Image (spheres, rainbow, N blue to C red):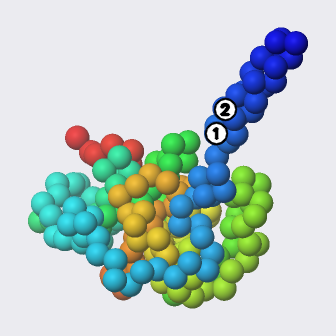
Amino acid sequence: MRFPRLLSRVVAAAALVMLASVPSYAQQQDAGDEPGLIADDGYVLPPEWQKQMVYFRTTEAPGTIIVQTSERYLYLVQGNNRALRYGIGVGREGFTWQGLLKISRKAEWPDWVPPPEMIQRQPYLPRFMAGGPGNPLGARAMYLGSTVYRIHGTNRPDTIGTAISSGCFRLVNADVMDLYARVPVGTKVVVRQRPEL
């Protein structure tokens, strides 16, 4: 009689371990992909993620955007070894990338249409969401070439400085509106994993 009781305890313990290892709903979805959540307008970014002018050496021309994912910063080159630096959220492990693209389109309060790959991973997401304060793309979006990636705002300002997205680059709404006003369609965007040596 002891063996069945011991076996049932082992099975129960194994079930608990399996349940604990299954990601919760919140862990499964990309942070920021929370349709309907209204961003906290009172949220203040920590100083290291706030927009600021910085010393920045590069051979890229003024007006170029450089994203350095390992640092979690986006730089808008100003010339004379200066750049405007914005804190960003970047792709989580397995969703980082690098390349050379151009801004192909810009949108104010963009609609959100999650790409099929994201729907496959997260079937609970809406297939379409109109632009507005509760939209995960935030106040502005700049589309990168013909890819599914964008530089956009967010309704989760607390995710700036993290690596948690599906490959897009997010800024707080005030910063994405500032960047949007400074760069035209056709702007060169350089995405790097590591800083240029």
Q: Residue at x 70, y 28 (%)?
A: 13
Query: Residue 61 falls in which quadrant of the image?
Result: bottom left
Query: In the image, is residue 141 above or below residue 167?
Result: below
Q: Which residue is mark 1?
A: 20
Location of residue 4 in the rendering, given as x and y in whole percent from the top left corner: 86, 17
Question: For this view, does 135 lie left or right of residue 52?
Answer: right
Task: Return the residue nearer the eye: 149 or 170.
Answer: 170
Looking at the figure, which quarter contains the N terminus?
top right
| Rendered location of residue 185, percent (x, y) | 47, 78
Q: Is residue 27 above or below residue 16?
A: below
Task: Using the rendered view, name the quadrant where residue 85 is placed.
Answer: bottom left
Return the residue nearer the eye: 187 or 5. Answer: 5
Q: Residue at x 60, y 86 (%)?
A: 131
> Is the residue marked by circle 1 packed among few (<14), some (14-19), or many (20+) residues within 10 Å?
few
* x, y percent for residue 134: 57, 82
Farthest residue to the front: give it: 1
- Looking at the image, which is closer to me, 143 or 95? 95
The amino acid beneath tag 2 is Val
Q: Position of residue 72 (x, y in %)?
A: 34, 55
Quadrant occupied by the C terminus: top left
Determine contact: label 2, label 1, CB under 8 Å: yes
Disc 2 target residue: 17
How packed mark 2 is, by other alpha carbons closer than 10 Å (few <14, some 14-19, many 20 or more), is few
Q: Quadrant of residue 66?
A: bottom left
